[in-house]
Image (spheres, rainbow, N blue to C red):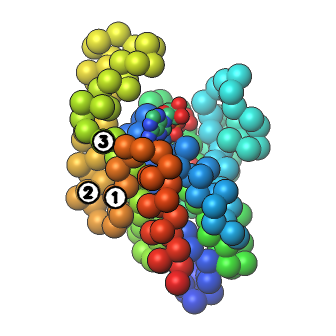
Amino acid sequence: MSEPDARARPGLLVVISGPSGAGKTTIARGLERRIAGSVFSVSMTTRPRTDRDREGVDYFFVDSDRFEQVRADGGFLEWADVFGRRYGTPRAWVEQQLIEGKVVILEIDVAGGKQVHERIPEMLGLLVLPPSEEALLDRLRARGRDDEDEIARRFAQAKSEMAEARACGAYDEFVVNDDLDRAIEEAVAIVRRRRG
Ligand code: ADP
Ligand code: 5GP
């Protein structure tokens, strides 16, 4: 599919990825608050809604049939299967925001970031990293949700996702989330620099 010329999209597309628990969502929402003219892209997902999720704010929650219909119609800029659930970025909405000159923030996984990079190479790829592998492991344990086998599996997956992100060429900025306020400041500075 041919993509519109970059000059037709005066906005900036910011893709934020990183391992689970690294602080992507917190930093993405921090950017949205701090950058004038920025908007957070609300993905469609087949994962069940939890008590903390707000429909239409965090995600659009849909069943598999609806997701497949949108996918078949070419409605996603990218989509991916994450832990057995599907997630997709609405294509037309993102394109429209970029045409209007907005900073569009996508908080998506590395597989999705690679797809976006192929279609929109001028995107800004921002990888959020934990301060250390040790800290990541501690955070996974602190959630108290998984047994040690599952924690080991998620830890290994997080490490391979970070390695993939570094190698794939889609991510050119790396933000270590040690202190949250500092990390948000750094992300804001990166976006402002790129926006010019
Ligand atoms: P992700 O979206 O990468 O899974 P979240 O943004 O949901 O991560 O953050 C996971 C949890 O860690 C949240 O409870 C958040 O408030 C907390 N958190 C984020 N950044 C920091 C930080 N620098 N120090 C301590 N806790 C943090
Ligand atoms: P959660 O269900 O915990 O909110 O998100 C799980 C994972 O899915 C996170 O890594 C998040 O970045 C990723 N994700 C959320 N929305 C999308 C999307 O639209 N596309 C892709 N590729 N990944 C997404």
Query: Quick check: marks 1 and 2 in contact, CB under 8 Å?
Result: yes
Of the residues shown, which amino acid type is indicated by label 2? Arg
Residue 95 visible from this viewpoint: no
Picture coordinates of residue 115 (x, y %)? 43, 60
Residue shown at 70%/70% (left/top)?
A: 37
Q: Is residue 189 left or right of residue 60?
A: left
Query: Quick check: marks 3 and 1 in contact, CB under 8 Å?
Result: no
Residue identifier under label 2 = 166
User: Which of labels 3 and 1 is toward the front?
Assistant: 3
Residue 174 visible from this viewpoint: yes
The residues bearing labels 1 and 2 have C-alpha atoms spaced at a distance of 9 Å
Residue shown at 61%/77% (left/top)?
A: 11
The residue positioned farthest toward the top in the image shown: 147
Mark 3 sits near ligand 1, with its Cβ under 8 Å away? yes
Of the residues shown, which amino acid type is indicated by label 1? Phe
Residue 146 location, quadrant: top left
The residues bearing labels 3 and 1 have C-alpha atoms spaced at a distance of 11 Å
Residue identifier under label 3 = 131
Residue identifier under label 1 = 174
Closer to the chain start, of discs 3 and 2, is 3
Closer to the chain start, of discs 1 and 2, is 2
CA neighbours of label 1 inside 10 A, class few (<14), some (14 to 19), many (20+): some
Q: Is residue 36 above or below residue 71?
A: below
Camera-nearest residue between 172 and 82: 172
Q: Is residue 14 left or right of residue 149?
A: right
Residue shown at 40%/18% (left/top)?
A: 142
The residue positioned farthest toward the bottom in the image shown: 7
Closer to the chain start, of discs 3 and 1, is 3
Of the residues shown, which amino acid type is indicated by label 3? Pro
Q: Is mark 3 on a helix, strand or loop?
A: loop
